Image (tube, rainbow, N blue to C red):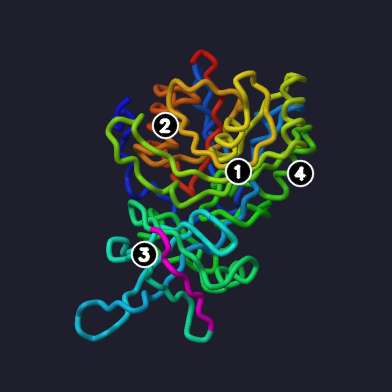
Amino acid sequence: MRLSDFDFDLPEDRIALRPAEPRDAARFLVVRPGQPLADHVVRELPDFLQAGDALVFNDTRVIPARLSGLREGRTTGGGDGAPVAVEATLHRRAAPDRWSAFMRPGKRLKVGDRVAFGDEANLLDALIVEKHEGGEVLLAFDVSGPDLDIGIARHGDMPLPPYIAAKRGEDERDRADYQTVYAREDGSVAAPTAGLHFTPDLLERLKAKGVSLHFVTLHVGAGTFLPVKTDDVSEHKMHAEFGEVSAQVADALNAVHAAGGRIVCVGTTSLRLLESATGEDGVIRPFADETAIFITPGYRFRAADVLMTNFHLPKSTLFMLVSAFAGQATMRAAYEHAISTGYRFYSYGDGSLLFKDETL
């Protein structure tokens, strides 16, 4: 497969800069392979599910993971002795005092450089202890554990996706908007955006319908925003992310399948995690590890039956995933329909409900 197989033209004005209000008022494209596309709104989700189905949510919580700081001991080279301004986007915790991060300007940073984040009254200092490709570094902070968490919460900004950040700055609304109503496990630098559509009322109506709600955790890293740079799709390497499926959730979801119910993944993150936790025998097992699963057309899904997801970037790994799930021709037609009828794309955009193509 070539990267060009997953390209399409997307007008700039289709990129959503703010979410729908209320959250469940977003438009909702229902995609059943072999059937006509159907336009709805998210609050109608219960109409497409049945008693005995299970919704699986990613309960990760977005942290304010973008830190601005100054590199100590090196200057701009302009003769003024001014420290160099840097920006770090934390994307994976490596130890109580260490985070992997993407840093800018990456090429000018060296192992051994110290960086001061925060302000003069309350600095959050770190040492660059490793440097990898693409501007990725390993930061060792001077504080650890809860003290580091507090420092990041105090000095960090919400890491809006680059396609939003390029058009406007982050503000206080994003602190609430870019977080699901059920988020509880700190650790992500990007929201599991399909979950942003849910309201407490919608969750209650789903339970009243007889649909069970289950929570897994996948901490989304900044690698989710990195473009695919290889023309041969098979050569692309995913960044690893930590995820956890408890024994209780695994048992409950296995029971749903055994009783004839469907597993409905809310977002590609919960789907990727469940597929990582499921064996070739179709049994979901407890999981607590990193996953770098890369799903492209030809993949045989083991756990997920239905996927609720937003509309994704051209040539992205997520467009490849939905093409694998519902079929490339089906998804290309769905995206053409969405673009022509004004659906809003990406993190703050509208949603879709995809039913797996059983013929693939």
Rate crowding at label 3 as few (under 14), some (14 to 19) or many (20 or more) other CA atoms within 10 Å.
few
**Residue indicated by mark 3:** 111
Report, in whole angstroms, how far the alpha carbon at label 1 lies from the one at label 3.
Answer: 29 Å
Report, in whole angstroms, how far the alpha carbon at label 4 lies from the one at label 1.
Answer: 26 Å
**Residue indicated by mark 2:** 320
Report, in whole angstroms, how far the alpha carbon at label 4 lies from the one at label 3.
Answer: 51 Å
What segment carries the magenta color?
Answer: 122-130
- Asked whether disc 4 touches disc 1, contact meaning CB atoms under 8 Å apart, the reply is no
Classified by dominant secondary structure, the portion drawn in magenta counts as: strand
In this rendered view, identify the residue nearer to me: 128 or 214. Answer: 128
Name the front one of labels 4 and 1: 1
Q: Position of residue 202 (x, y in %)?
A: 70, 44
> Regarding mark 3 in the picture, which secondary structure is present there?
loop
Q: Position of residue 113 (x, y in %)?
A: 37, 70
Rate crowding at label 1 as few (under 14), some (14 to 19) or many (20 or more) other CA atoms within 10 Å.
many
**Residue indicated by mark 1:** 243
> Regarding mark 1 in the picture, which secondary structure is present there?
strand
Q: Position of residue 176 (x, y in %)?
A: 59, 61
Quarter of the image holding residue 235? top left
Magenta span contains residue 228: no
Name the front one of labels 3 and 2: 3
> Regarding mark 2 in the picture, which secondary structure is present there?
helix
Residue at left offset 35%, top offset 44% = 227
Report, in whole angstroms, how far the alpha carbon at label 3 lies from the one at label 2.
Answer: 36 Å
- Up-down relation of residue 215 to residue 116 (above or below): above
Check residue 59 in the rendering and tell me which mark sits there, or answer none: none
Check residue 204 in the rendering and tell me which mark sits there, or answer none: 4
Q: Amino acid at mark 2?
A: Met
